[in-house]
Image (tube, rainbow, N blue to C red):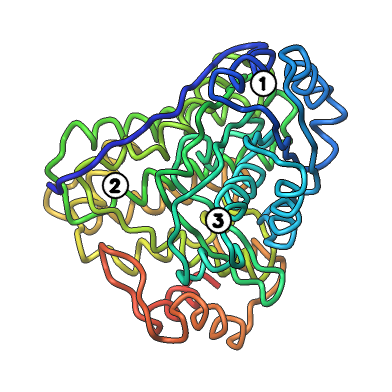
Amino acid sequence: MQSFKYYAPTHVVFGPETEQQVGKLVKKYGGTKVLVHYGGGSVVRSGLLDRVCKSLEAEGIAYVKLGGVVPNPRVSLVREGIELCRKEGVDFLLAVGGGSVIDSMKAMSVGVPYKGDVWDFYTRKAFDKECLPTSCVLTIPAAGSEMSDGSVITNDEGGLKKDYCIDEFRCKFSILNPVLTYTLPAWQTACGATDMMMHTQERYFSKDDDMDITDNIAEASIRTVMNSVKIVLKEPENYRHRAQLMWAGSLMHNDLTGCGTSGDWATHNLEHELSGMFDVSHGAGLAALWGSWARYVLNENPTRFARFAVNVLGVQNDFNDTIGTALRGIEKMEEFYRSIGMPTNIKELIGKDITDAEIEEMADKCSNYGTSTVGALKVLTREDMVNIYKMAR
């Protein structure tokens, strides 16, 4: 068991019509001029953006707006937002959208007071922690960014996708209204469920397997998501199961499901290069890679994979064949991905064969050209990365 710090300061307001409390919450946390950050047309067409702005107006809070966030959010828009915040004297940031919008907002929050370029944080050239306060109205349960300490940004030049994680990124408050997710397309719903499950799987597959309470929380969380996503794909306006997914997305990435474990995060790192190169949905990229990663590292802790197979996926435990039980669990996980429309290899994900040159380029970027490794269950070198990408092709 690893020693751990658990820090989850975000004020969560959960339930129908909770977006109407935005103005009061901004005032409570000291905001006087807000940047309202959002993506594309859905928050406009649905009337959500208007409701949020009217809530701010009702409390006499000034605001400016900046839209245009895309999946795999770009540093170019972050830079535009930083300049806007400085020009307008913004002192509080509000994201209205999913993980991409929230991550873009977090990058702005650390970039506004910084004298250099915000990309410095994502390439580890800067480590400042001074940030503007952040908040969100969540519309897509997936990334968990509404309660996490992380932000992932893509550089328009070269397609590099990098993360930066500091406690100061944690939102002051997060509004979670499951009704806002009723109109999510099936693909986006399934990608989101895959992403939130992987946040817990990255923490679960570890050499630390003696924190039973954390393991039990993790296993129950994954089972709940697997059950609820299948229901909402058939019944998009099922409030009970939309609510399970929305709350699970937050809990599965606010560190709760990893207390006492070291975590791995190799699949996320591998996927960042995949979505950076091909601009694919993050959750789908994770599904396309996970089975290959799991088979590649299985022997590092086969009993852990066997426990997952039995406790999460309902595989019959063959006590005389731990490896066999574990492999059946990996197969069962891939069956689940396919059942919700997710790919289980790169060709299914991008619609064509990936080339050796593209694999080599992704491995170069993931390993910082052979100078760094990823993963903890099995530490992956550049050669390992190439092998996993090829297994997944």
Amino acid tagged 1? Glu
Of marks 1 and 2, the one in the foreground:
2
Q: Is residue 178 above or below residue 215?
A: above
Q: Position of residue 380 (x, y in %)?
A: 33, 74
Element assignment for label 3: strand
Q: Residues within 10 Å of mark 3 (few under 14, many from 20)?
A: many
Q: Position of residue 203 (x, y in %)?
A: 32, 48
Note whether residue 10 is visible: yes
> So how many labels did they put on this image?
3
Q: Nearer the viewer, mark 3 or mark 1?
A: 3
Residue on which disc 1 sits: 235
Q: Identify the residue at image location x=46%, y=29%.
A: 248
- The residue shown at (35%, 65%) is 295
Mark before the other along the chain sequence, 1 or 2 = 2
> Distance between the Cα atoms at labels 3 and 1?
31 Å
| Rendered location of residue 315, percent (x, y) | 30, 41
Tell me the kind of residue under disc 2.
Tyr
Q: Is residue 123 above or below residue 221?
A: below
Cα–Cα span, label 1 and label 2: 30 Å
Secondary structure of the residue carrying numbered label 1? loop
Residue that label 2 marks: 204
Q: Is residue 94 above or below residue 178?
A: below
Q: Residue at x 61, y 67 (%)?
A: 117
Q: Which quadrant holds residue 7? A: top left
Hey, what amino acid is under mark 3? Val
Discs 3, 1 touching: Cβ within 8 Å? no
Q: Callout 1: few (<14), some (14-19), or many (20+) C-alpha neighbours within 10 Å?
A: few
Q: According to the image, label 3 marks what residue?
A: 152
Compare marks 2 and 3 and give the one earlier in the sequence: 3
**Residue 322, visible in the rendered structure:** no
